[in-house]
Amino acid sequence: MKVFSRKRISSAFGALGYLAVGACTSLAALVAVGVLAVLVPLCVVGIGLPVLPGVVQAVRHLVDVERRRVGELLGRVVPVPYRPVEGPLPQRIRTLVADPATWRDSLWLVAHSATGFLIGLVAIGVAVSAVALVSAPVYWWAAPEGVLVSGYRVDSWGSALLGVPIGVLYGVVVWQFPRFARWQSLAARHLLAPAAGVVLSDRVAELTASRAAALEAHGTELRRIERDLHDGAQARIAAVIMQLGIAESMYGDDPAAALSLLRKAQDTATSALAELRDVVRSVYPPVLSDRGLAGAVTALAARCPVPCVLDVEGVGRQPAAVEAAAYFVVAEALTNVTKHSGARRVSVGLRTGDDVLVITVDDDGRGGAVEEEGSGLTGIRRRAEAFDGTVVLSSPPGGPTTLRVELPCGS
């Protein structure tokens, strides 16, 4: 193996860049430690509690940068097992404080702020000194009156030539930068990665919640179908049977009246058939089979009373259950926009990537949408959670409102 191969040189420069960027993130970590040191006592007396979630989220963005850097260097993704932060302020604070990841992040902040800047500064200094001292004869030739090179005074040809091997020794240290960078990244991974079993237990909890949501959604759907059949088609079919029985008993005495009842029975049967078709469509709209999800959503957008712009990007055929869920999500979202938003324009986006179907619905209405039990937004969330999907709603007072739903669709 060549000592001065292109791969080794690239690795050394890459490690230098990693350590130098680590110096910058160390300064950011130092600022974060200072902010938290001031904020924690204020939280004890209750003053700092309103801003605590925002500060912790900002810290998590910084830590996520470090996780990506560590993952890229080590070639292994560092898991991010943060618990969902939702609900009113007290609930969010309890979630953040009880989350073990918050304390791991805090430990990394302290360790990195204490060491990262120093390590990065030393790495830059060693690299600059290696180049400068190897070039000491050039400095002496250009400035024969003497010059200070990285703390080493060059005032003769002897001192200039002696600087070369010293620079080479510095270069040997530079050659070890990949090892130093790996050590730093391994330490960061040890601090930031979840404890053994945490990811698995969190995943089990997520799947348990998804299963419960799926069962709840399935039960709700069954109750809706049963109600529609009982109150609609079943009642009409029972009326048809009754009308046919009366017509049979009247046929011998009053054929004209019997014929009138038969016609009413026919009309009632036609209505029952139409209601049965509506129930079938509510289970799996035939338009999905005929035109696919993109075509079905295009039809929804065309029927929306609010002017609707559709943006479909790379959406092919998906599993039938996912297509049905996505169709009903868009239908419910457009219904909410029509009924409650007062919007003048709405846009619907569909795209797929990384085995996830992403649905976005944006409107320029009055905003202030709130998810309440029994509302359409609750139904959307339940449909998404049944597929282990996510729902993010942004609807500040005054608008605009953005609904983003992600549905896993991989095999």
Image (cartoon, helix red, strand yellow):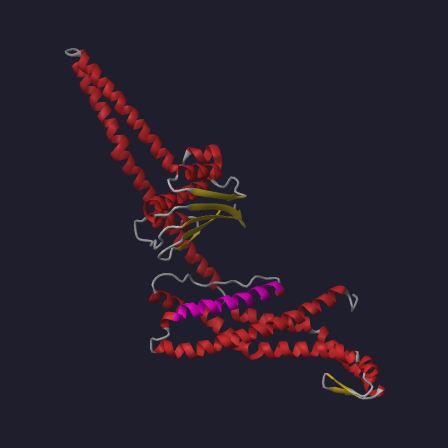
In the depicted view, which residue is nearer to us: 1 or 390? 390
Does residue 100 appear anywhere in the picture? no
Q: Is residue 352 left or right of residue 2?
A: left
In the depicted view, which residue is nearer to us: 119 or 149? 149
Q: Is residue 310 left or right of residue 375?
A: right
Q: Quadrant of the N terminus?
A: bottom right
Above or below 305: residue 14: below
All told, the count of numbered labels is: 0
Above or below 296: residue 266: above
Quadrant in which residue 95 is drawn:
bottom left
The segment highlighted magenta reads 51-72
In the depicted view, which residue is nearer to us: 39 or 187? 39
Quadrant in which residue 185 is drawn:
bottom right
| Residue at 67 percent of width and 67 percent of height | 14
Quadrant in which residue 120 is drawn:
bottom right
Is residue 69 shown in magenta? yes
Q: Is residue 190 left or right of residue 215?
A: right
**Residue farthest to the left?**
253
Does residue 372 appear anywhere in the picture? yes
Residue 333 percent across, percent down from the top left: 38, 46
Residue 204 percent across, percent down from the top left: 44, 57
Majority secondary structure of magenta residues: helix
Above or below 147: residue 40: above
